Image (cartoon, rainbow, N blue to C red):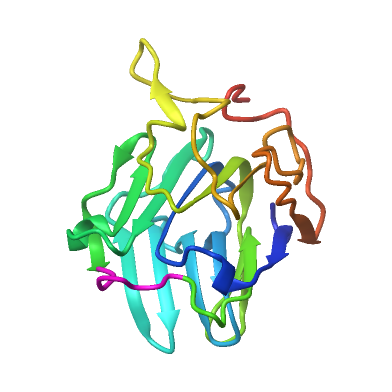
Amino acid sequence: MANTYLSKTITPSNYNKKKFTFSTWFKTDGITASGEIFGFFGANDYTTLRTNNSNKIDFIVYDGSTIVRKISNALLRDVNGWYHIVLAVDSDNSTAEDRVKIYLNGERITSFSTSTNASSGFEFINNNKTNFTIGKNNDQNGDAFYFGGSMSHFHFCESQQYDATPFGEYDANGVWKIILEPSVTYGTNGFFILKDGNSVTDQSGNSNNWTVGGGTLTNTEDCPSNVF
């Protein structure tokens, strides 16, 4: 995606700030140091899921200081295959470790080099975070970071904390494969985009369409169900 990103202006008070699930398939370019998968951000704070410059999964909530953070020990070394990632949060979960769950290719990540859990009832989207982006985020200094690579089948399910199984399954060879039509509940603000090539038209039935905020969104034949 290089410097291409998708954007949506939101009213945070209309969102379930404590419980939601993201799922997407992505392929890294092996070049970009820090790749922003998605984020909510305001003037000086943000909630973002990214790959960091050590090729690790990195989830951060920053509101003047780092409040929640999960950095995986696992490294993303494959630049040829597609990865599937699920971020599922529910700050009302009674178990602190279960308030942020991250799955990579069907397996829950349980080993972290940094692990700061969300407090009970924590709001991941505060009222300042009115910018919702895919492929870009801004840090506390206002510096922009973009995702380098490709994305496909991007889901946002509001008010649900799903694991990876609605979105993927193992084939007979034990390889994690995409489910093209997952059976999930999207909620009022949920959406399903990048289903058919580079379409930002919502396929969830909610008509929560997106716009290209910058760059050019390019369609590729390489996709999770047809790897080139």
* Residue 208 x, y percent position in the rendering: 70, 51
Q: Name above or below for residue 193 compared with residue 225.
A: below
| In the image, residue 168 above or below residue 60 | above
The secondary structure that dominates the magenta segment is: loop
Which quarter of the figure is the C terminus placed in?
top right
| Residue 5 image point, x, y percent | 71, 59
Residue 80 x %, y %: 54, 34
The residue drawn where x is 52% and y is 35% is 82
> As drawn, which residue projects farthest toward the top?
172
Q: Residue furthest left?
A: 95
Left or right: where does residue 14 sit relative to residue 197? left
Above or below, comparing residue 28 to residue 95 in the picture: above
- Check residue 122 for magenta coloring: yes
The percent coordinates of residue 222 (x first, y second) are 66, 29
> Foreground residue, 206 or 48?
206
The magenta stretch is 117-124
User: Quick check: 134 left or right of 177?
Assistant: right
Q: Nearer the viewer, residue 125 or 34?
A: 125
Residue depicted at x 43% and y 89%: 64
Residue at 38% across, 37% down:
164
Q: Which image quadrant for residue 205?
A: top right
Asked which quadrant contains residue 14, the reply is bottom right
> What's the residue at 44%, 84% (across, down)?
63
Closer to the camera in the image, 14 or 132: 14
Residue that protrudes farthest toward the right in the picture: 216
